[in-house]
Amino acid sequence: MEDIDSKEFNGALFPLIGIWEGNKGMDTSPEPDGEEKAAYFETITIAPVGDAVNAEEQTLVVLQYTQSVTRKSDNKLFHHQVGYWYLDKEKDELFYSLTIPRAMCVLAQGRATVKGAVTEYELVANIDDKNYGIIQSKFLEKKATTRAFQMQLSVEGDTMRYKMLTNLFIYGRDFEHTDENILTRVV
Ligand code: HEM
């Protein structure tokens, strides 16, 4: 077994490992008559799991993460997300899963690119994609459908930046639910 904390083992996922905190978050979420913007702070914890071999053929290097997001105005947890980062180093293919406590899951696919000191991660999932898609409860499908998810995230040293775009259909219209933040590695 390789040392799962080693840079070589984790490859392009290695820069993600750590405990990250950020208090510059901004959420735009849907309201029946428009939108609500909310400033937030959050902690993202990302840790190695090890490797997973599929069908004796595909080796995935895997990290697990937990994201806890608190609204600044009332200090209430208003978003929580758990999942995995997976990298198939041979195929240079990246996967990202998320589960949120609204009864929905996403498996997104993309790529990690190292550009000098910066590692960039891009991920996409779409409701019409049978592999990299969205699973949601009947209620959500009917009343607050998630149609697509995209994330751009970068790490440079101890700084992480991300933008997430969740395309919803809610209250009879399309809505771009967005979230972004800048975080610092604290551990
Ligand atoms: C930092 C990240 C996020 C924050 C802070 C956040 C926050 C929010 C807030 C405040 C609402 C409105 C809830 C209400 O009306 O009472 C909302 C709605 C929703 N969010 Fe997020 N969200 C985040 C990420 C995501 C992601 C990644 C997804 C799915 C891929 C998602 C899916 C949804 C859905 C389906 C709704 C519709 C439910 C509704 O408005 O009633 N959110 N979110």
Image (spheres, helix red, strand yellow):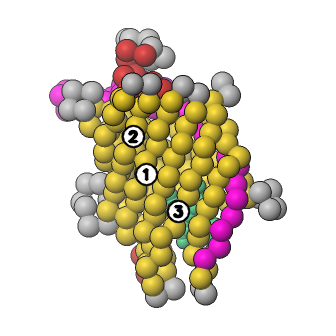
Q: Residues within 10 Å of mark 3 (few under 14, many from 20)?
A: some
**Residue indicated by mark 2:** 121
**Residue indicated by mark 1:** 151
Q: Is residue 97 magenta?
A: no
Which amino acid does the dot numbered 1 rest on?
Met
Residue 145 is situated, as x and y percent measured from the top left of the image, at 43, 74
Give the side of residue 167 with respect to residue 42, left or right. left
Question: Does residue 138 appear in this view?
Answer: no
Distance from disc 1 to disc 3, alpha carbons, whole Å, reads 10 Å
What residue is shown at x 43% (from left), y 48% (from top)?
A: 152
Disc with the residue nearer the chain's start (1 vs 3): 1
Q: Are marks 1 and 2 in contact (CB under 8 Å)?
A: yes
Give the side of residue 35 with respect to residue 147, left or right. right
Which part of the image, by quadrant, shows the C terminus?
A: top right
State which quadrant residue 91 falls in.
top left
Disc with the residue nearer the chain's start (3 vs 2): 2
SS of the residue under disc 1 = strand
What residue is shown at x 50% (from left), y 52% (from top)?
A: 163
What residue is shown at x 77% (from left), y 57% (from top)?
A: 72
